[in-house]
Image: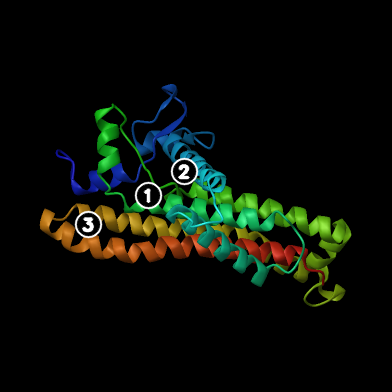
Amino acid sequence: MASGMTSSEYIAHHLTNLTYGNHPVNGWSFAESGEQAAEMGFMAINVDSMAWSIGLGAFFIWFFSRVAKTATTGVPSGAQNFVEMIIEFVDENVKNVFHHKNAMIAPMALTIFVWVFLMNLMDLIPVDWIPGIASMMGINFMKIVPSTDLNVTLGMSLAVFILIIFYSIQQKGIGGFLAELSLQPLGKWALPFNLFLELVGLIAKPISLALRLFGNMYAGEMIFILIALLPFWAQWMLSVPWALFHILIITLQAFIFMVLTIVYLAMAHDHH
């Protein structure tokens, strides 16, 4: 725990993003507190979340492309075995859930699983390490787990939502898509009620995707921060078991986001 901070200040500091935006008083600048970040409004950007998510995405592309270029049919390296295991795992899940022809689904599912896993994995880095280094460089705030930022999880889920709408219209036509929204489950005589139910279900998909990932990762990060407030001996006694358990959580959340995306896109391809 940083010296000179109370427990509440320490928690607030570690839960505040490095935000850049147009402040009503200071103009375009980095926020110096959570309150200033809120005053910047909707167009402010969480620079740390963007930088870490883009960086981890670039690392994923670099690592997988490097393994692909050096792949061999002989005795594979450990990295090749690891990548092939992930690809086979994702491919099997796509085949089990998605029974249509679309060459984009499997690569997208692989990207979602690995990218979300890498973002979640940052939660296992001790909470004071990178923010401490950033502080020495004059950077006041640094959140390194992008999936604890609702803007990131909602952005990904909205991209999935756009794909759901796109493929629903592509596969069924605008008339078929509107008919699914208005004529089921109770037929044309209950059209307003059908439309209400279907719209609620449709909008709930991206919201549930975003909130599920955000809520689980935010709670995990909060527990790590609370453990960091304890005496040094208690930190090691609690943080190691929690980190081992959290490995399961971060993997499971990446898997759930991937599988639900595949399910939603399979539903978008289905005809009723």
**In the orientation shown, which residue stands out farthest toward the front?**
74
In the visual, does 51 lie left or right of 141? Answer: right
Q: Is residue 49 above or below residue 179?
A: above
Image coords of residue 134 (percent x, y): 30, 33
CA distance separating discs 1 and 3: 17 Å
Residue 227's disc is 3
Q: Is residue 220 above or below residue 39?
A: below
* Residue beneath disc 1: 122
Residue 56's disc is 2
Precedes in sequence: disc 1 or disc 2: 2
Q: Which kind of residue does numbered mark 1 sit on?
A: Met
Dot 2 lies on which element? helix
Q: Is residue 10 above or below residue 270?
A: above
CA distance separating discs 3 and 2: 26 Å
Image coords of residue 161 (percent x, y): 66, 54
- Residue 143 visible (yes or no): yes
Precedes in sequence: disc 1 or disc 3: 1
